[in-house]
Amino acid sequence: MAYGISTYAYFWRISERAPCPLTLPEMLADTKSLGGEVFQICDYPLIEGYDAARLADLRATADDLGLRLELGTRGVHTAHLLRYLEIAEALGVTLVRSMLNTADHRPTTDEAVDLLAPAVERYAASGVTLGLETYEQVSTDDLLTVVRRVDRPQLGVVLDPGNSVARLERPADVVAATAPYVVNIHVKDFSFTRRDGWVGFTYAGCPLGEGLLDYDGMIAAVRPRERGINQIVEHWLPWQDEGFEATARREDQWTRHSITTLLRSAS
C-alpha cells in the first residue's frame, strides 16, 4: 500500500484559469516533495497524445523521483481501454481507473460487460488492474453487477464514497457494498453548507478530517494495508472569489494537509 496524489489535487493549477498551468513533471516533483509515493494521472487527456519518447521521459522522471504512476480515464469502449493499456505499459503502470459513462456513451450493464470482458483479459495478461469508480451517474448496485459478471480479479472498484451522495446513496453503504472489490481509494472529504438565506445547501469539498467522510470506518472496511490498495488524494475545492492566486494557495494547502494527515495516520 502507498499514499499518493492525483491530478485532481491540482485541478485549478492545471486548468485554463491558470496563467501557467503546471506540467506533469512539476506535479510529480511536488508530489515527491510532499512525501507522496504514487502519482495518479487521472482524466488528463493530453497523455493520449504523448509519443513513445515522451512517455519514456515521463517514466524516467517518475523513476528518478522514486514515484509509482497510475492512470485514469473515462469510458469502457474496448479500443479506448486498450489504448490506455498501451500507455500503462509504457509508464510501468499497474492500475488504471475508469468510469462507465462518458459524455456521449452511457452503456447498459450488459453492454458494459461485453465491452469490458475482452479488455480485462488483455489487462490481466499484462499484469494491469482496471478499476471502475463509484459515482453518481451509475448506481453502486449496477457498478457491482458489471464487476461481478466480468468476474476477473483484474477488474475492481475505485472507491470514492463522496461521489455517490448526489445519487442519494449513503457513503457508509457504498463503502460496505464495494469493500470486497476495491482496488484503489480516492481520499477526499466533503460537507454540506447552507446557502445564503438558508435556501438549500452547497455540497462541496473540505479539508480532510473536517467533513462527513468516515475515513477510519472506510479503512477498517477496505483494509488497504493488508490488501496493498493505494490511497490517492483528491479535492473538491470550490473556486475562490479572490481569484486564481488565492485558489491556488488554498489548493496547495489542502493537498499538503491531506497527504500529511494520511502519512501521519500510517505512523
Image (cartoon, rainbow, N blue to C red):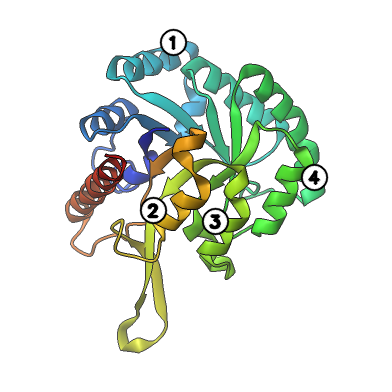
Residue 106 visible? The answer is no
Q: Callout 2 environment at 10 Å: few (<14), some (14 to 19), or many (20+)?
A: many
Image check: 71 left or right of 74? left
The first of marks 1 and 3 along the sequence is 1
| Residue at x-position 24% and y-position 61% | 240
What is the C-alpha distance between the residues marked 4 and 3?
25 Å
Instruction: Please state which of the two labelled residues, at mark 4 or mark 3, is closer to the viewer.
Output: 3
- The residue that mark 4 highlights is 111
In which quadrant will I find the C terminus? top left
The first of marks 4 and 3 along the sequence is 4
Q: Position of residue 153 (x, y in %)?
A: 67, 32
Query: Who is closer to the viewer here, 90 or 182?
Result: 182
- The residue that mark 2 highlights is 188
In which quadrant will I find the N terminus? top left
Dot 4 amino acid type: Glu
Quadrant assignment, res 15: top left
What is the C-alpha distance between the residues marked 1 and 3?
40 Å
Q: Which mark is residue 53?
A: 1
Q: Which mark is residue 175?
A: 3
